[in-house]
Structure formats: C-alpha cells, structure tokens
Amino acid sequence: MSQSSYGRMWDAAQGALEYLLEDEYPTMQLHPQKDRMQVFQTLATFYLRYLKIFRALEEVYDQLVHPQKRRVVHQVLEGVMGRLVELKNEMVELEYSEFHYFDDILQDLKMTPEDLEVPIPRYFVREKMRALKEREKMLAHILAKGGRQEENTQVPVQSMSIERAMWLLQVSERARQGRLRAHFMKTIRQEEQRRLQSSSSSILDPDRAATCIQKIPAQQPTPTPAQLHAQQLESRRHGMQEEHEAEYQRALANIKESVQCVDGPDIKESLQEQIRQWFIECRDATGKFPDFPSPEDGGSASIFAQKTPEQVAAEFAAKEEEREKKKKSKEDKDKKGNDRKKKKKEKKGKMKGKKGKGDTEEEEKGWKMTPSNFLPTVVEGAKLYKEVWHYRDEKQNFLQSFDAQLVREEKRLEVEEELRVQVDELMRQELKNLKLVVDRDKGKKKKKVKKSSKKKKKKGRKAGKKKKKEKDLTADRTIESLYEELVLEGFIIRPMNVTLSDYIGEYSYLGTTLRQADIEPMPSLSDVRQLIALYGILPLGSQCVHERGPLIRAVLLTGPAGVGKKMLVHALCNETGANLFDLSPSKLAGKYPGKSGLQFLLHIVFKVARQLQPSVIWIGDAEKTFYKKVPKLEKEMEPKRLKKNLPKVLKSIKPEDRVLVVGTTRRPFDADIKPLCKVYKKIILIPRPDYASRFTLWKELLQAGGAQLGPKLDLSSLAKVTDGYTQGHILQAIQTVLNSHRLNQQTKRPLTAVEFIPPLARLDPVYKEEEEAFKTWYSRTPLGKKRARAARASEEEADLKKGKTKGGKLQTKGKEGKNKKRTKKK
C-alpha cells in the first residue's frame, strides 16, 4: 500500500471516530438508566466500534512516514486504547463478569469473531528495540559470567571396569542392529502390501476422487513474491520513519534558534507595547492602575484573552472579593463547628429509620456512565486532524517529510511563551514604579500582602515536615549492580520467545445462548487472550493508558495444569518488552533469610522494576503464599514468606509505575480465599479447550511440528477424542509421536489419528470434578459473589412479576364468582 492509501485509511478512521463521539457524548449526559440489558447493548456497541477504529489507527501509525502526522495519530491512538480499557471496566462492573458475549451486536455491525481480537500495537517493542537489544546483551553477559563460575565446580565421576564397559557396548550394539533389521523388514512388508493394493484397485469414481481431494487440508503456503515485496516495503517504511524523525528533531532545534534570533526582538517589543497600552486603558476606564496578574493566574496571557479593560478589572475585583469571603467563611466555620456536630448527631438518630428508603432510592437511580479520562484527548486529536490535516494538500510532498511551516508556527508560540515570562517580570517592575509615583497611598497594603505570603510559606514548611519519606535501603548502589545481583540470584529471568498470537484458541459461539438460558458458560481461550491484552499489554505498553486508566496492580491466572498460564506470562513480557521477575516460593527458598532479608529483596526488586519499567513480577504457585495449612514437606521452604509484605508493597505501586504482579496457580482452593483476593483483584479463570479450540490446536501444532496433513489423519476425531485434555497434553503427545525418524517416513507412511492415542492414554485429563471445583471456587470470589447476587435478584424480580400477574387473575376470578352468587340469590 502507498502513503496515499494509508492517508485514506486514516481519513476513514477519523470519520468513524467523529460519528462515534457524536453518539457517545449524549449518553454521558443522559439520566440514570434502569434497563441493564439496554445499557450493556450501548456499552458493547461503543466497545466494538472503538476496537475497529483502534485496529485501523494502529495500522496507519505503523506505516505512516510523516513525523507530524504520526504524532497526531499517536495521540488519538492512545486515547482510543484508554477508552477501550474504560469501557471494559464499565461492562465488568455492570455484568459482574470478566467475560462478555457480543453475538447479536456482531451481527448488527457486520463483524466477525476475529474482529474481537485486541490488536497489539507494534510500536510497543519496535520503538525501543535498541534498549531491548542492549538489555539482552547485558543479561546474556551476566548469565555467562554466572555460568563460568558453575563450570569450575568438579562433578564426581564413577569408575567402571574395562570388562563392564565392553559388555555394555556389545549389548547396545546388538540392540541397535536388531532394531534396524526389524525396521528394514517392516518397510519391505509395507511396500509389498501397497503394490498388491495398487494392482488390485480400479480407477476411482470422479465423486470419490473429489471427496478425497476435499479431505486433504490446505497446507501453509510459502510466501509469494508479492507478499515478500510487501514485507520489504514495510521494513523500508520503518527505516524511513527513523530517518524522517531524526530530520524532524534536528529541524525543531534549528527553526527555534532562527525564530529566537529573527522574530524574538519584535515579539518582545510588541508584547511590551500591548501591556503598556493595557495600563493606559485601565487607567482611563477605572481611574487607577490595575493589579498585574500573578504567574499562577497566567500572567499577561490572561489579560489579552479577547477582553476589554473594564472586564479584566472587574474580574480582578471579583477575585479579591472571593478571597475575602473565603477568609470570613473559615472564621465562621471554626465558630459554628461545635453546633454542626451536635446537629449531625441528632440527624443520625433520625436517619436510621429512613436508611431503607434511601437505599431503595439509590438502587432506583440506575446506571450512569462514569466520566472518561480519555475522551478529552480523543476529541483534541480529532479536532487537530480536522483543522490541520483533513483539507491539507500533500500531493507535492512525495517523500512525506516534515512541514517546515507548521514547525515554525509551533516554535513561534513556544518562543512567545518563553519571552512572555521575561516581559512579565519587567512590566511588573514598571507597574510598581508607576504606582509609586501616582498611587503612593497603596504602600501599606503591599506590606500586608507580604506578611500573608510569609505566613503561607511557613504553613507550607510545616506541611512538608509532616510527610515522611521512604528510606532507600540501596542509595549507595547503582541500578546496574542491583540488576546483576537479581540475575545471578535467579530472580530476573529471560522470557521465552512466544507471543500472544501463539496462544491458540477459538471463539465460543454458544456464550450468548447459554446466558439467555440462565447457564453460565465457561470462557473460551479467545476471551482469555482479550483479557490479557486489555489488562496487561495495553497498560504496560502505554504510559498514558496506565496513568489515566483503571489501575490494575495484580492479576491472577488460574486453571488446570497445561492450559498455558506460564506461556501467557512470557507472552505478556515479549509483547511489551517488559522485564520478567520471578518471585515464586520455590525461588525464594533459602535466599535472603529473615524479615530484614525479605524486605531488602522486595525493595531491590521493586526499585529495579520501577527504574526499568515496564516490568512483570511473576509469582508461580501463588496459592502457596496463602496456604490454609502448609504441608509438612514444604515447611522448610517457608512458602508463606510473602503473605504479610506483598499487600504493603502492592499499595506502593502508583499509576505512573508500569509494574504488574501476575500470579499463576493450578490449585487455588488450597489457599485462604480472602487474603488471596485482596492481593489479586483481577482473577482470570482459564478453562480447558473446547472442541473448536482443540481442532485448531491439533492443526496448528501438527503443522508447526513438520507434519503433513493427509486424508488418513482425521483431525475432527482427534478433537472429539481429546475432550478433557489441555493444550499441554496435546503438545506432549505430538512431540512424542513426531520424532525425526517418523517425520522422514511421512511420504511412504502417512500419519494417522490412531498413532496419537497411546501417548494420550498415559496422561490424565481434566475430569469434570476438577472443573466443577474451579467453578465453585470462582463463585466464592468477590466478583463471583456479586454475579450470584445479581442472578438471584433478577430471579426474584421475575417471580414477583409472575406472582402479581397470577394474583391479578385470581382476584378477578373471585369477583366474578361473587357476582354469580348474587345473581342466583336474586
């Protein structure tokens, strides 16, 4: 695609965003809504529309070359990402569930389940590739240094007699020759059987031949020349982006210098003339010189905001009156404080009986959308696009380099702001001199102002003394030394080379129908991918999203063994370029003993994590930290060391710290649920794969292992047979069957489904009892309890409605019976 094509894509995305903002702003101002289904429909439609715009903007930002355009796209892109996270949080609070189903809305918007996948911005890793490569080199160097120390340790070697060694060699050689002989005879027998079958078989019927061809699954094709050319163009565009960005940065400095030299004196003179003219106008209008606005109020910039001298003077007078009123109100509050306390106590006693009514009124108010922290940035970016880039003719700019005129306008404003500060100081002094000459009586008032400023300074000092600063236990050490210590101790590890797209799983098509039938469906693996992207990747990758969005400090991944919990942790690090810290109980055993040692370790870990953010702190076997009863075999390990310190350390994570604690557990029921849920506010239950996910797993993993998929390999049967088996079980079975010897035999002996049954039979699947145990445990979590309460409330409302209708019918029947009796008596 050319740059004009991406320009059209950007234009279409901005147009869709403009329509979306027109639809969303009225909902922010609506009265509270009571119909939860209608609210969910509106939230879900906004979410899907933002997701579509996000995908288009991410593609545009990745391929555009113009540096100034990319800045506008980046601003809107981060706002859209943050809005997605906010809408997801709104849906969770509305439905009391982490998983949502949009089948009806997908049909209305003509979208497919693939459109639900949250795209991961490629600039998260690409824009800091140099830093990541340097960090990888440093990590490899430290690990190599530690490995050399381990190689020096001598391993004891057991001695063996010559006769014993000769006997072992002879036995192994005879066994090898026997295996080869048996294999050779087997291949000869199979070739003879094939010859007999080919000679006896007749020509196939065309319909039968067509069915055989259709059964063969499509192989992954090699990239075509057009695809290779497109890849080369993309990489070339990335190189051009870096070149244009470097040119733009150089131009910013050069143009600013030229503006300061050429236009600086003229700007300074014009500002001074404007302020002097304002002095004269205010003197003529009010009869006295005005007060110069302070730097906090904006300085001289607040004067020339399209206002007359009378309006400016009136504003300053109103501000002075407000300050005097505030002082008087503070004194009155101190006097009337005791009276108010007494009245409040009396009111509390009266309001106790009215609490029930108030609660019902609050419930009747319904749902209202919370104000967004990202909509202003989105609106500002959309406005900037419309004013600057929408109607701008870029046909002559073939290379898509920066626009010098725009840079000059921006730098002129910057220079004007810098010079305004200097001019304000000079004009303040000039105004003081004028007032001393003309208004001598105002000297006393100035002294009083000085006293009040001194008092304020004293108060500020006192307030500063009250705040306690946290002690830095490693103030005398560098971050590099702390990083090296953590690597050598095994607390910083290298993440596996996996991405979120490698976590294979399909969309659940029965979620909406099951929920309509009041059956809570198990989430799909596609839903899990979306949650990892929304809760982990987007906040860790974007500083803006992490600071302004809902703060998520810790996430717990729970599910049976083999569902890919550790893989998701490693994918989270790779997609964001985050450091991976391992604080599992097994790693903590025997290291940094005692309370002081543990505090020192946590201080080091979180200090390095903040300095080298984004960072992921992984706690494997998270249930061991909150054991109900520690097993005897694990008492020496002290698995509950982090129980008291972990909640305190989590509170220290601020919105500007891109640090996420991720716990993984396959036995959450062994832990005390209250402290576990206090630490991990977000809990993601990962289920075993369903039929659709198992089918795609078999297909993708077999092709990745080098298997040739033929008609004899029935993937559908394999997917049905492996119900209850996890991704880890399927991968293990494929690895045992697809050895190098079996892969070489595929042309003569194609793979069959039966070959994978024996290795699967040796593995234990996830039984229904275990799955039910996970469901019951999740229902005891805070979000699970809220979901159960909401379901009960809806059932009770439905029963009440049915009861009212039945009661109404019975009452009418009773009246009719009475009327009949009266007529008979007559």
Image: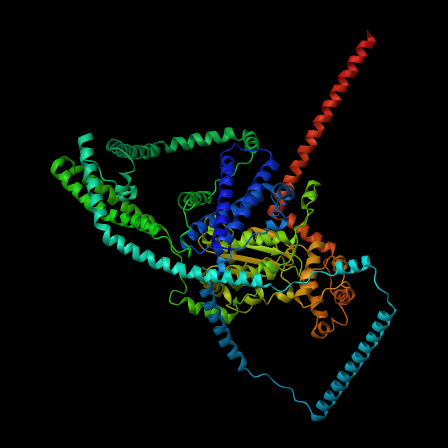
Where residue 593 appears, x then y in whole percent? 51, 67
Give the tally of numbered discs.
Answer: 0
Question: Residue 756's image quarter?
Answer: bottom right
Where residue 405 appears, x then y in whole percent? 33, 50
Q: Quadrant of the C terminus?
A: top right
> Is residue 9 placed above or below 187 in the rendered structure?
above
Q: Give whichever of 552, 758 is nearer the camera.
A: 758
Specify how the rendered protein is coloured.
rainbow
Asked if residue 679 shows in the view, the reply is no
Where residue 808 appears, x then y in whole percent? 72, 23
Q: Give whichever of 558, 266 is nearer the camera.
A: 266
77 horizontally vs 669: left or right? left
Residue at screen point 24% across, 45% down: 454
211 horizontally vs 68: left or right? right
Where residue 198 appears, x then y in whole percent? 84, 70
811 horizontally vs 644: left or right? right
Question: Residue 583's image quarter?
Answer: bottom right
Asked if residue 526 shows in the view, the reply is yes
> Is residue 369 placed above or below 399 in the rendered structure?
above
In this view, the residue farthest toward the top is: 826
713 horizontally vs 468: left or right? right
Q: Give whichever of 320, 353 is nearer the camera.
A: 320
